[in-house]
Amino acid sequence: MPPDVGNHVPVARNIVFLRGINLGARRRVSMEQLRLHLEAAGYQDVRTLLQSGNVVLGATKTPALLEQDLASGLRGAFGFEIGVVVRTGDELAEVVEHDPFAGQALDPARYQVSFLSMVPDRARVRALEAADVAPERVAVRGREVYAWHPGGVARSELAKLITARRLGVEVTARNWRTLTKLLEIAETIDE
């Protein structure tokens, strides 16, 4: 029996959300360069979606270690800090499955989930949930904030409350259409 068979660590599907790239001229990251960098770093089945820092990849590291390694590697490769939040494929499937606004948030472009680097302080969560932003709606579930913006995100009062400064943790948001597409991609990667 080969010596590494007993020590095999399975490759897990991970969804990587990068924060703050491709929003201005100075923080440009091409998805092709990103993919090539991640493949060269040893990640498997690397796939990107859109230009806003959505990556699906296979890795043997825990999500917490993967976040640290990616942040360090991306800083070295691109020359600036990039916020990194990781969820496993199973975690993203749970986010979609436990949709608190199913049947209510009807436009996937106006329905966002913000992914947090950790569970925020309970007082900050209570303040967010108590905000008077009707007809917008918000629900916090652990490390995710579901936000329905029926009037759009651009002029949303609620979106202004779901920030790193207000929640005390790293925050990056994706709309529902992007999340379901990322989940679809993740499900095509063999475990």
Image (cartoon, rainbow, N blue to C red):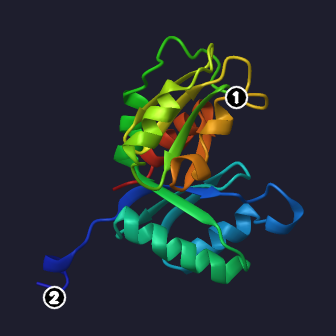
134 relative to 126, above or below: above
Quadrant in which the N terminus is drawn: bottom left
Front in this rendered view, residue 59 or 16 = 16
Q: Residue at x 66, y 72 (%)?
A: 81
Q: Residue at x 43, y 25 (%)?
A: 99
The residue labelled by disc 2 is 3
The reply to whether residue 185 is visible in this rendering is no
Residue 27 percent across, percent down from the top left: 79, 66
Work out which residue is located at the far right of the displayed protein and give it. Answer: 25
Q: Residue at x 55, y 41 (%)?
A: 114
Query: Sequence order check: which comes first, mark 1 or mark 2?
Result: 2
For this view, does 28 lie left or right of residue 188? right
> Which numbered tag is attached to residue 57?
none
| Label 1 – label 2 distance at C-alpha | 58 Å
Quadrant in which the C terminus is drawn: bottom left
Front in this rendered view, residue 156 or 37 = 156
Residue 188 percent across, percent down from the top left: 45, 46
180 relative to 10, above or below: above
Q: Amino acid at mark 1?
A: Glu
The residue labelled by disc 1 is 157
Q: Residue at x 48, y 18 (%)?
A: 101
For this view, does 88 lie left or right of residue 171? left
